[in-house]
Image (spheres, grey):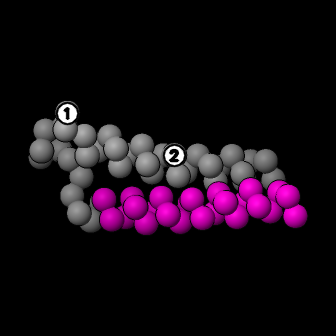
Amino acid sequence: MAYGVLGALFMPFLAGTLLVLLNSARLPREFRSRTVSNTLLVVCLALFAYLAVDQIVGLFE
């Protein structure tokens, strides 16, 4: 169960980090994320954040 919680916490962190790094002003414009990849990363971030909360709440039930 602990591995599920750790994985559920890591995935939103990874998606958020990718959103920040791949849209950074330090990257040349041609290498930055476009609308489709940003949308998919936001969907992944929301989904895994929900799953992380669900896993954490499940620990206390």
In the picture, the disc for residue 9 is none
In the rendered image, which quarter is residue 35 located in?
bottom left
Rendering coords of residue 52 (x, y %):
65, 57
Rendering coords of residue 27 (x, y %):
19, 37
Q: Which amino acid does label 1 sit on?
A: Arg
Rendering coords of residue 23 (x, y %):
25, 46
Magenta residues span 38-61
Q: Mark 2 highlights which residue?
A: 13
In the visual, does 9 lie left or right of 34?
right
**Residue found 40% across the figure and 61% down from its top:** 42
Which of the image's four quarters has the C terminus? bottom right
* Tag 2 secondary structure: helix
Q: Is residue 27 above or below residue 43?
A: above
**Residue found 60% across the figure and 64% down from its top:** 50
Badge 1: few (under 14), some or many (20 or more) residues near its Cα, within 10 Å? Answer: few
54 in magenta: yes
**Residue found 62% across the figure and 49% down from its top:** 9
Q: In this view, does 60 lie above or below 31?
A: below
Q: Mark 1 highlights which residue?
A: 26
The residue nearer to you, when weighing 37 against 17, is 17
In the rendered image, which quarter is residue 48 located in?
bottom right
**Residue found 72% across the figure and 51% down from its top:** 5
Q: What predominant SS class does the magenta segment belong to?
A: helix
Furthest-right residue in view? 61
Rendering coords of residue 17 (x, y %):
42, 43
Alpha-carbon distance for marks 2 and 1?
A: 21 Å
Badge 2: few (under 14), some or many (20 or more) residues near its Cα, within 10 Å? Answer: some
Q: In this view, does 39 lie above or below 33?
A: below
Q: Which amino acid does label 2 sit on?
A: Phe
